[in-house]
Image (cartoon, rainbow, N blue to C red):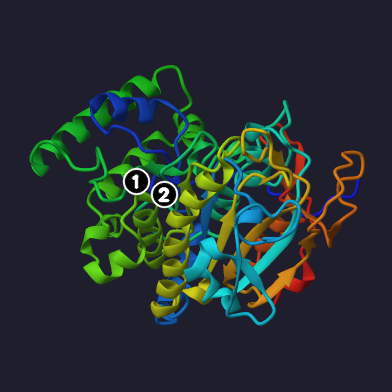
Amino acid sequence: MNRKSHDHDVIAHGFAGCGTADHWNRRTLLKAAGVAGAAWLTPLAERLTLADEQAGGKTRPRSVIMLWLQGGPSQLESFDPHPGSKYGGETQAIQTSLPGLQIGSTLAQTAELMHEVALVRSVTSKEGDHERATYNAKTGFRPDPTLIHPSIGAVLCHQLQDRVEIPRHVSILPNEWSGRGGYLGDQFDAFRIGDPVGNIPDVKPFVAQDRFDRRVNSLMNVVESEFARGRLKKIDEGKTLHRTSIQSAIRMMSSEQLKAFDVTNEAKDVRDQFGDTAFGRGCLAAIRLVEVGVRCVEVTLSGWDSHINNHELQTGALATLDPAFAALIRELKRRDLFDQTIVICGGEFGRTPTINPAGGRDHWPHGFSVALAGGNLRRGVVVGETSPDPKLDKENPLQDVAEPHNIEDIHATVLHALGIDFERELETPIGRPMAISKGKAIPHLLA
């Protein structure tokens, strides 16, 4: 069997790399020390960081911000309207800053920035169930009962390493499938937080620092002595890395980089651009996190599952998305972060062209939209379209979709633009070779 290069061991990172939120009290520290942990910084990352510091810190890490529209946004009410057609519904189209392109009037602010966006309006998937389609969209693979694949953020953290004192993979307003590390390991799971307007729980000691330090040292002595019983310490410690996991968590608790989560540090006029919503604040927090070196931030906006009252539900969700998405692009550009950050905006599938008797649109994976922006992607391009009068033959659903590209192609394109060899094979913990992505990069989107 021909194989490309393999990674024979999963590179370990600590809580400061990618990890899940937890309660760092005595019980949690014991738990963290007794289960598989992670090293905060590998020798490779040390060398890369040192090289960057010697270069004056001029290079910035490549990052991804994913605006995850959970529930299935309607392409016909957003980026691919067909007003006046049999299936167009109530949404009207408006001109955009990209000549010849119209999008829904529900995205008035975004329309002014479409010259900065790469829009794919012919995305397809073979999954029409929410859970399976979400897995497919987040990982680039269809569900497999024998394996859990990593999300794109976990892959990014695994492949591109650097120094940071807070988690490099963050999920804001998360759902069940937010930021899974999959076969790469739990250390690549996303750190989960809610509305960034509040404090991050469980990162500040409840006692004075000297007392906290004494407790940690005492606890570590207990854990170390118990762990050493009947074990070859050097071998087993290398597998669990419990000490480095705790040290990484403690390092995060005292890090100045935690301030990146606090959007109240921003000026009011900046906050107002994103809208007074949890999602808008999440988008602003995403920018702040990328600014300090976080690799991937996913911000979830729910409310798109419009089997009834489609126009009302989609319009309401778009009213939240529009100012946040537009402000995200503007602010990334203002802070000189746009060229190093890829923004992905989309959901697990689209909505049916037909409107059902309840005034809703149902699940439709046969042609929907994903918007991309920033990084090493072309700007002001549109790939594909759906027909204003699609034939609903389920045996040949793509016959009226121009230039169809599946979810896997979106993953491959983003990874390629980030400088990652998406065809490279990694090895799962049982030695199974697995390509990072099985899609194909979309040439029209690559600068």
Q: Which mark is residue 248?
A: 1
Q: Secondary structure at mark 2?
A: loop
- Residue 140 placement, left or right of 36: right
Q: Position of residue 34 (x, y in %)?
A: 40, 25
Q: Which mark is residue 40?
A: 2
- Residue 444 placement, left or right of 379: right
What amino acid is labelled 2 in the image?
A: Trp
Q: Position of residue 20 (x, y in %)?
A: 41, 38
Which residue extends farthest top?
A: 230
Q: Is residue 61 visible?
A: no
Disc on the earlier residue, 1 or 2: 2
The front one of 99 and 253 is 99
Q: Residues within 10 Å of mark 2 (few under 14, many from 20)?
A: many
* Callout 1 touching callout 2 (CB < 8 Å): yes
Q: At 44% across and 27% down in the image, what residue appears?
A: 35
The front one of 408 and 162 is 408
- Where on the picture, by quarter, is residue 272? bottom left
Q: At 13% across and 36% down in the image, what residue appears?
A: 206
Q: Is residue 165 above or below residue 272?
A: above
Q: Is residue 197 above or below residue 25?
A: below
The front one of 156 and 66 is 66
The front one of 364 and 189 is 364
Q: Secondary structure at mark 1?
A: helix
Q: CA distance from mark 1 to mark 2?
A: 6 Å
Q: Quadrant of the C terminus?
A: bottom right
Q: Is residue 218 visible?
A: yes
